[in-house]
Amino acid sequence: MAQIELEHIERVFRLGDSEVHALRDVSLRIEAGEYLAVMGPSGSGKSTLLNLLGLLDRPNAGHYRLEGRDVTTLSADEQAGCAARASASCSRASTSCRASPRPRTSPCR
């Protein structure tokens, strides 16, 4: 089981009559202990992706599984509890994430 798994994630922002597709059909798996660097030009969705991984934002479509649990189905309060104990430590300054194992007693399970 992947530590972090995204399936067909979409994030759309509405600006007036326009729609901006920040993330379109993003799928990825991060195993425990793996490192991931998120790189790209300005406006390519790096910060949007990291905000979703850190449970600071929600996708418009798709599924985000954290240790096998679909966190896209959780309430805002439940997501906040998971975010406080999330196993992925993300640093926006370096735009990198490292999935680190944690005890199975996690309340996000």
Image: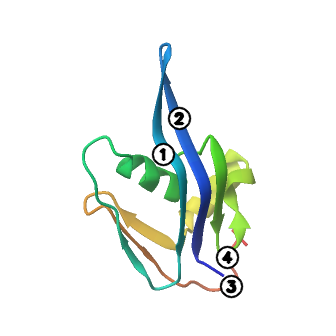
| Position of 84 relative to 41 (above/below) | below
Is residue 9 rendered to the left or right of residue 15? right
Instruction: Count all numbered tags in the image, as a single digit.
Output: 4
Give the structural element (helix, strand or loop) at label 4.
loop
Q: CA distance from mark 1 to mark 4?
A: 29 Å
Q: CA distance from mark 1 to mark 2?
A: 7 Å
- Amino acid, disc 2: Val
The mark found on residue 12 in the picture is 2
Residue where numbered disc 4 is placed: 106
Give the structural element (helix, strand or loop) at label 3.
loop
- The reply to whether residue 47 is visible in this rendering is yes
The mark found on residue 23 in the picture is 1
- The reply to whether residue 54 is visible in this rendering is no
| Contact? badges 4 and 3 (CB < 8 Å) | yes
Give the structural element (helix, strand or loop) at label 2.
strand
| Position of 91 relative to 2 (above/below) | above
The mark found on residue 104 in the picture is 3
| Contact? badges 1 and 2 (CB < 8 Å) | no
- Amino acid, disc 1: Leu
Mark toward the viewer: 1 or 4: 1
Mark toward the viewer: 4 or 2: 2
Q: Nearer the viewer, residue 97 or 19?
A: 19
